[in-house]
Amino acid sequence: MSDSDPIIVSLPRGNGHRAAHSVTSSRSRQATKISFDRRELTQILDIYGRKVAAGEWRDYAIDTLGEKAVFSVFRKASEHPLYRIEKSPRLSRRQGAYSVIAATGLILKRGHSLKSVLRVLDKSLRLVEA
Protein backbone atom coordinates (compact mmCIF):
# COMPACT_ATOMS: atom_id res chain seq x y z
CA MET A 1 0.00 0.00 0.00
CA SER A 2 1.33 3.46 -0.88
CA ASP A 3 1.04 6.65 1.18
CA SER A 4 -1.69 8.03 -1.06
CA ASP A 5 -4.03 5.01 -0.84
CA PRO A 6 -7.00 5.52 1.48
CA ILE A 7 -7.26 3.38 4.57
CA ILE A 8 -10.48 1.36 4.75
CA VAL A 9 -11.76 0.80 8.27
CA SER A 10 -14.51 -1.69 8.94
CA LEU A 11 -16.66 -0.80 11.93
CA PRO A 12 -19.36 -3.03 13.47
CA ARG A 13 -22.93 -1.77 13.24
CA GLY A 14 -25.74 -2.51 15.63
CA ASN A 15 -27.40 -5.15 13.43
CA GLY A 16 -24.32 -7.36 13.10
CA HIS A 17 -23.25 -6.02 9.69
CA ARG A 18 -20.03 -4.13 9.19
CA ALA A 19 -19.87 -0.67 7.58
CA ALA A 20 -16.78 0.34 5.63
CA HIS A 21 -15.50 3.89 6.10
CA SER A 22 -12.67 5.50 4.17
CA VAL A 23 -10.12 7.39 6.24
CA THR A 24 -7.59 9.50 4.39
CA SER A 25 -4.18 9.71 5.99
CA SER A 26 -2.55 13.10 6.58
CA ARG A 27 0.26 12.19 4.15
CA SER A 28 -2.13 11.83 1.23
CA ARG A 29 -3.76 15.19 2.03
CA GLN A 30 -0.33 16.83 1.92
CA ALA A 31 0.43 15.16 -1.41
CA THR A 32 -2.53 16.91 -3.07
CA LYS A 33 -0.98 20.38 -2.73
CA ILE A 34 -0.51 22.10 -6.05
CA SER A 35 2.99 23.31 -6.94
CA PHE A 36 5.02 24.50 -9.91
CA ASP A 37 7.13 21.87 -11.64
CA ARG A 38 10.74 22.41 -12.76
CA ARG A 39 9.81 23.53 -16.28
CA GLU A 40 7.30 26.08 -15.01
CA LEU A 41 9.72 27.46 -12.43
CA THR A 42 12.42 27.78 -15.10
CA GLN A 43 10.09 29.91 -17.24
CA ILE A 44 9.05 32.09 -14.30
CA LEU A 45 12.58 32.55 -12.94
CA ASP A 46 13.85 33.45 -16.42
CA ILE A 47 11.58 36.51 -16.50
CA TYR A 48 12.22 37.18 -12.80
CA GLY A 49 15.99 37.25 -13.40
CA ARG A 50 15.65 39.74 -16.25
CA LYS A 51 13.44 42.03 -14.17
CA VAL A 52 15.84 41.87 -11.20
CA ALA A 53 18.75 42.73 -13.51
CA ALA A 54 16.76 45.72 -14.77
CA GLY A 55 16.12 46.83 -11.17
CA GLU A 56 12.33 46.48 -11.37
CA TRP A 57 11.82 43.53 -9.03
CA ARG A 58 13.69 42.61 -5.86
CA ASP A 59 12.03 39.69 -4.07
CA TYR A 60 9.65 36.79 -4.57
CA ALA A 61 7.64 34.25 -2.60
CA ILE A 62 6.24 30.85 -3.54
CA ASP A 63 3.10 29.50 -1.87
CA THR A 64 1.79 25.98 -2.39
CA LEU A 65 -1.83 25.89 -1.34
CA GLY A 66 -4.40 23.13 -1.53
CA GLU A 67 -6.09 24.33 -4.72
CA LYS A 68 -3.43 26.54 -6.33
CA ALA A 69 0.23 27.50 -6.40
CA VAL A 70 1.24 31.17 -6.28
CA PHE A 71 4.50 32.88 -7.27
CA SER A 72 4.40 36.45 -5.90
CA VAL A 73 6.75 39.20 -7.11
CA PHE A 74 7.73 42.14 -4.90
CA ARG A 75 9.46 45.44 -5.53
CA LYS A 76 10.47 45.51 -1.85
CA ALA A 77 10.08 42.73 0.68
CA SER A 78 7.82 44.81 2.93
CA GLU A 79 5.26 45.66 0.23
CA HIS A 80 2.29 43.86 -1.22
CA PRO A 81 3.15 41.79 -4.30
CA LEU A 82 3.32 43.65 -7.61
CA TYR A 83 2.18 40.56 -9.49
CA ARG A 84 0.98 37.07 -8.65
CA ILE A 85 1.49 34.20 -11.06
CA GLU A 86 -1.05 31.54 -10.17
CA LYS A 87 -1.44 27.93 -11.23
CA SER A 88 -4.91 26.57 -10.58
CA PRO A 89 -5.53 23.18 -12.25
CA ARG A 90 -9.18 23.38 -11.24
CA LEU A 91 -9.64 26.06 -13.95
CA SER A 92 -7.62 24.26 -16.63
CA ARG A 93 -10.62 23.14 -18.69
CA ARG A 94 -12.35 26.51 -18.54
CA GLN A 95 -10.15 29.60 -18.77
CA GLY A 96 -6.75 27.99 -18.34
CA ALA A 97 -4.72 26.93 -15.34
CA TYR A 98 -2.33 29.90 -15.39
CA SER A 99 -3.00 33.55 -14.64
CA VAL A 100 -1.09 36.76 -13.92
CA ILE A 101 -2.78 39.04 -11.41
CA ALA A 102 -1.78 42.67 -10.68
CA ALA A 103 -1.52 44.19 -7.19
CA THR A 104 -5.03 45.60 -7.55
CA GLY A 105 -6.51 42.14 -8.17
CA LEU A 106 -6.99 42.72 -11.90
CA ILE A 107 -6.34 39.59 -13.94
CA LEU A 108 -3.91 40.72 -16.64
CA LYS A 109 -3.79 37.46 -18.57
CA ARG A 110 -5.19 33.96 -18.19
CA GLY A 111 -4.55 30.94 -20.36
CA HIS A 112 -3.61 27.31 -20.86
CA SER A 113 0.07 27.96 -21.64
CA LEU A 114 2.36 29.47 -19.01
CA LYS A 115 4.67 30.86 -21.69
CA SER A 116 1.89 32.85 -23.33
CA VAL A 117 0.59 34.11 -19.99
CA LEU A 118 4.04 35.32 -18.91
CA ARG A 119 4.39 37.45 -22.05
CA VAL A 120 2.23 40.10 -20.38
CA LEU A 121 5.06 40.69 -17.88
CA ASP A 122 7.87 40.70 -20.44
CA LYS A 123 6.66 43.54 -22.63
CA SER A 124 9.26 46.28 -22.81
CA LEU A 125 8.57 49.95 -23.39
CA ARG A 126 9.53 51.39 -26.76
CA LEU A 127 10.22 54.98 -27.69
CA VAL A 128 7.67 56.35 -30.12
CA GLU A 129 8.90 59.13 -32.36
CA ALA A 130 6.55 61.95 -33.29
Image: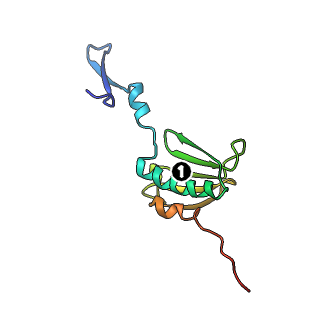
State which quadrant residue 26 falls in.
top left
The single residue placed furthest to the front in the displayed view is 53
Tell which of 92 and 59 is nearer to you.
Answer: 59
Q: Quadrant of residue 129?
A: bottom right
Q: Residue furthest right?
A: 130
Q: Position of residue 108 (x, y in %)?
A: 60, 61
Q: Residue sitting at 44 percent across and 55 percent down?
A: 92
Question: Residue 73 vs residue 11: left or right?
Answer: right
> Which residue lies at the image location 41% right of the left edge and 52% below the top edge?
39
7 lies above or below 15: below
Q: In the rendered image, which quarter is residue 48 located in?
A: bottom right
Residue corresponding to mark 1: 86
Say which quadrant the N terminus sits in.
top left
- For the point 67% across and 52% down, the residue is 82
Nearer-the-camera pick, 84 or 24: 84
Is 123 situated above or below 130?
above
Viewer-proximal residue, 120 or 92?
120
Picture coordinates of residue 74, whole percent (x, y): 66, 48
Question: Percent x, y for residue 10?
Answer: 29, 18
Name the element at disc 1: strand
Label 1 crowd (10 A; few <14 / some 14-19 / many >=20) = many
Left or right: 104, with 48 as reference point: right
